[in-house]
Image: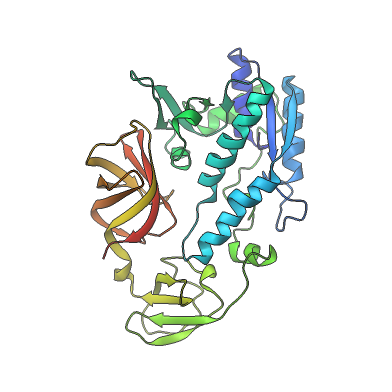
Amino acid sequence: MSGGVDSSATAAALIDEGYDVVGVTLKLWPQDCVNRAEDKCCGPQAVMDARSVCDKLGVPYYLIDEAEDFQKEVINYFAEEYKAGRTPNPCVMCNERLKFGNLIRRADQLGAHYIATGHFARLERSAEGRTLLYRGKDPRKDQSYFLFSLKQKQLSRAMFPLGEKNKTEARDMARECELKTADKEESMEICFVPDNDYGNFLQKADLVHKHAGDIMHVDGRKLGTHDGIEFYTIGQRKGLGISHPTPLYVIDLEPESNRVIVGDASMLEGNEFIVERCNWIPWDDPPESIEVTAKIRYNHPGAEATVTPLDDWRAKVKTHSMQRAITPGQACVFYQDDLVVGGGWITKKIE
C-alpha cells in the first residue's frame, strides 16, 4: 500500500469480495534519502495515510523495511545504467525485484496466498494453465508495461482488482468507504526523485560525480564540453549548452570515452534494434517469429513490429515504420491486442 488512492481502493475492493486482507507498505527509503517528499510513496506521510486506510477498513497493517534491497536493486541499478550510457526504468525493476519478489516471501511468512496491488492491468488464466497479463481496461491508466518482466510464479500470485476499472471508479470506491486518500493527488514521477531532477538526485546521493567530457558532432567536430554522460539521454535537445545554426539532439552516449554525440533529428530515426533479458508470458519457448505491437517506452503509442527471438536471452525487433529515439536501457514491451506477449530491454539500435 503506497498511501495513494489506487492501493486504498484495491484493499476496499478485496474486502468487498470477501477476501481476508492484510495491508503492507514496503519502507523503501533509507533514513538519509535525499529529495524525499513527504507526500510521495517513499515518504513518511504515505505510511501514515496507508495506516489510516487500514484502520478505517479494519484490517491489519504492516510496515516492512526493504530499504537495503531497494538501494541495491533499484537505486544502484538506476545509477549504473546512467553511468553506462543507458536510460533506466526503475519502476519495472521495483515491481520485479521488490513488490513481486521480496513481498511474495513476506506474504508466505504472513500466510497470504496472493499479492494485490493497485496497478491498472488485468490477469487471466489460459487453458494451458498459464497466467496471462493484459492491458488495463482504462487505456489512459494502463500499467501493464511496468509488469512485463514478471515470471509465471509471480503472476500466478498476483491480483489487480482495478484492472477492469478506470481512475474515476477507483476514487468513487475510496469515497464510498470514506477513505482519506480518495481525493489524494496522484504522483507521476519516479518515487525517489519527486522533482524529476534525476541528475541532482544522483549527485546528492553520492552515486555520480561530475567528470568533464566532450560534446561531439557526428561529423567529428568538438562543439563543447559536459559534466558527464549520466546527465544526458538519447533524444535530448534542451540543456546541451552548445550553439549551432540548426537544432541538435543527443543521438549516442559513449561511456568509454565519456563523450556525448549529437546530430540532427533524422539521426534519431531507426526501425531495428536488439533487446535482451527477454521475458515471454504466454510461452516458455516463443515462436520463431512474432507479430506484435511494440512499445519502446511507456508513453510510446506502440508500433507494429516483427520480433525474432535469437536465443533464450535476446531478440531482434524490426518495426514496420521508423521510430524516434530508440533508447538503450528502456523496456520494449510486446502486445498482441491487449495481451502482453512479453518484452525485453533495449541494448542497441541496428544501423
In the figure, 72 relative to 226: above or below? above
In the figure, 269 relative to 13: above or below? below
In the figure, 180 relative to 271: above or below? above
Residue at 67% across, 43% down: 41
Q: Is 38 left, or right, of 239 in this rendering?
A: right
Residue at 46% across, 62% down: 86
Residue at 50% across, 52% down: 89
Q: Is 269 left, or right, of 72 in this rendering?
A: left
Location of residue 313 in the rendering, given as x and y in whole percent from the top left corner: 36, 46
Could you say which quadrant of the image residue 64 lies in?
Answer: top right
Q: Is 5 left, or right, of 165 in this rendering?
A: right
Q: Is residue 142 visible?
A: no
Location of residue 334 in the rendering, given as x and y in whole percent from the top left corner: 34, 42
Where's the N terminus, which quadrant?
A: top right
Could you say which quadrant of the image residue 287 lies in?
Answer: top left
Q: Is residue 260 visible?
A: yes
Residue placed most toward the observer, 42 or 248: 42
Location of residue 18 in the rendering, given as x and y in whole percent from the top left corner: 61, 12
Residue at 66% across, 39% down: 184
Location of residue 305 in the rendering, given as x and y in whole percent from the top left corner: 25, 47
